[in-house]
Image (cartoon, grey):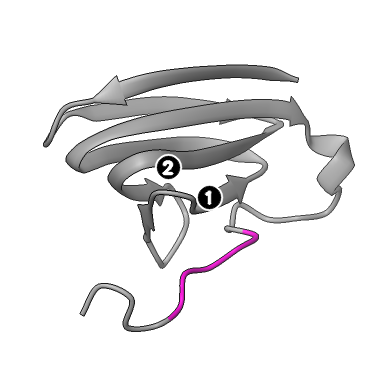
Amino acid sequence: MNSSTFILARGELASFRLKGRACLISCVAGRLWVTASGRREDSLLTAGNEVTFTGRGRIVVEALRTATVRLESFEAARLKSRPLLPLRRQPAGLFQ
């Protein structure tokens, strides 16, 4: 498993490609918007929330306010046969 933690300033973007490995994106602090190619829905994360993606494609993370982000990647075989979709979704109306 590989992991890294970094800070994004408000409005700052991070973009990367999935290449067959699974990726867990965690919001340690702040607020994040996360989207992935081929997905119909985006994810909004606050401190303590996370989302996992598998497969191939581009992921974009934007800080809606200054945020600390943790990325962890691991062998996709552990999540075999999952599409490029989040494993955990946020409750409806969370940011309304």
Q: Main secondary structure of the magenta part?
A: loop
The reply to whether the C-beta atoms of the residues labelled 1 and 2 are less than 8 Å apart is: yes
Q: Tag 1's secondary structure?
A: strand
| Residue 11, label in figure | none
* Residue highlighted by disc 1: 50
Residue 52, placed above or below residue 42: above
Task: Give the crowd class for mark 2: few <14, some 14-19, many >=20 residues within 10 Å.
Answer: many
Identity of the residue drawn at 65% across and 60% down? 87
**Mark 1 vs 2, N-terminal side:** 2
| Residue 27, label in figure | 2
Residue 12, placed above or below residue 85: above
Residue 37 position, x and y percent, is: 43, 47
Image quadrant holding the N terminus, namely top right
Q: Give how far apart the Cα atoms at labels 1 and 2 are.
A: 6 Å
Identity of the residue drawn at 34% across and 38% down? 60
Type of residue at label 1? Glu
- 74 on left or right of 94: right
Image quadrant holding the C terminus, namely bottom left
Identity of the residue drawn at 60% across and 52% down? 84
Type of residue at label 2? Cys
Residue 76 position, x and y percent, is: 79, 36
Q: Tag 2's secondary structure?
A: strand
Residue 31 position, x and y percent, is: 27, 48
Task: Give the crowd class for mark 1: few <14, some 14-19, many >=20 residues within 10 Å.
Answer: many
Residue lying furthest left: 11
Residue 38 position, x and y percent, is: 47, 54
Residue 85, placed above or below residue 3: below
Is 12 contained in the magenta span? Answer: no
Identity of the residue drawn at 53% across and 28% down? 71
Q: Residues in magenta?
A: 87-91
| Residue 45 quadrant | bottom left
